[in-house]
Image (cartoon, rainbow, N blue to C red):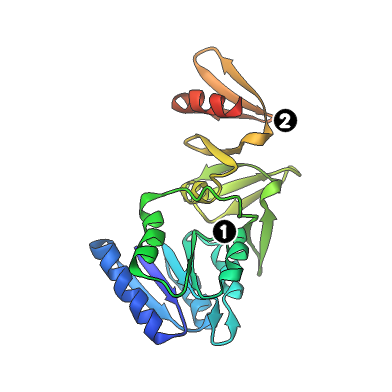
Amino acid sequence: MNILIVEDESRIAKRIKRMTRDIFGNTLQSLTHINTLQEALRFIENNSLDLMLLDLNLNGDSGFDLLTTAVSESFHTIIISAYKDQAITAFEYGVLDFVPKPFNRDRLEKALHKTISKENINSNDIKFLAVKKRHRIQLIPIEDVLYVKGAGVYTELFLTDGKKELHDKSLEKLEQLLASSFERIHKSYLLKMSEVHEIIVESGSKYIAELKNGVRIPIGRTKYKDIKAKWF
């Protein structure tokens, strides 16, 4: 695990570092602490990460200015903040968890455990997926996403208007965030179940989900019964 802590209070940062080391043990490869928004942005541009632990108030700067960029990246983000009223907004942007200050080890461990166990969020709060464009970040409303296809370490978002967008998060990471409305129907696909028009069985034990717009997506053999039951 390569982890970045973005926190402007050194006392709290030291506590987070100590707990994180204890929780991850030998699986922790690097643990970096940065206390300003601009430094954090530069670090993200030049380093590979698995997780960012982010405060929302950084010496007067808003952590959301960093969050918009972070959620478009390949790594997960967990918010650690006293601003509980901003939790819903943070989840809308696609964070893995929101740990309110003050916090104890058990609460932080629960949040960090999600990165290890690949536990799904099962939350309806996420409203956007952020994708990187040239010199900007675009927020794609979840309601505009029909299905997601794995593309190596990246994913492709297929939208209602026929367009396709590339996202830096893997299919596994997006599955964690989108579990409330999307199903993993195949090793390469996440599908919004409300878009399914028909489930088709073809010769040779081939299973197909036909969407309302006519697009056909394969269903994995081991997932067919479960997907069919959820669709009905």
Helix, strand or loop for disc 1: loop
Q: How many labels does the image show?
A: 2
Which image quarter is the C terminus in?
A: top right
Residue depicted at 49% across the width and 23% down the height = 225
Residue mark closest to the camera, 2 vs 1? 1
Residue depicted at 28% across the width and 70% down the height = 21
Residue furthest to the left in view is: 26
Residue furthest to the right in view is: 161
In the rendered image, which residue does mark 1 sit on? 94
Position in image of residue 41 (x %, y %): 53, 76
**Foreground residue, 219 or 77?**
77
Q: Callout 1 environment at 10 Å: few (<14), some (14 to 19), or many (20+)?
A: many
Badge number at residue 212 = 2
Q: Distance between the residues labelled 2 and 1?
A: 27 Å
Residue depicted at 55% across the width and 80% down the height = 57
Q: In this view, does 202 lie above or below 102?
A: above
Position in image of residue 29 (x %, y %): 30, 66
Mark 2 or mark 1: whose residue is earlier in sequence: 1
Which three-letter amino acid code belongs to the residue tagged 2? Lys
Which image quarter is the N terminus in?
A: bottom left
Q: Is residue 65 above or below residue 133?
A: below
Q: Do the numbered discs 2 and 1 sit on residues whose CB atoms are within 8 Å?
A: no
Q: Callout 2 environment at 10 Å: few (<14), some (14 to 19), or many (20+)?
A: few
Residue depicted at 43% across the width and 64% down the height = 51
Position in image of residue 168 (x %, y %): 53, 56
Which three-letter amino acid code belongs to the residue tagged 1? Gly
Q: Is residue 92 left or right of residue 187?
A: right
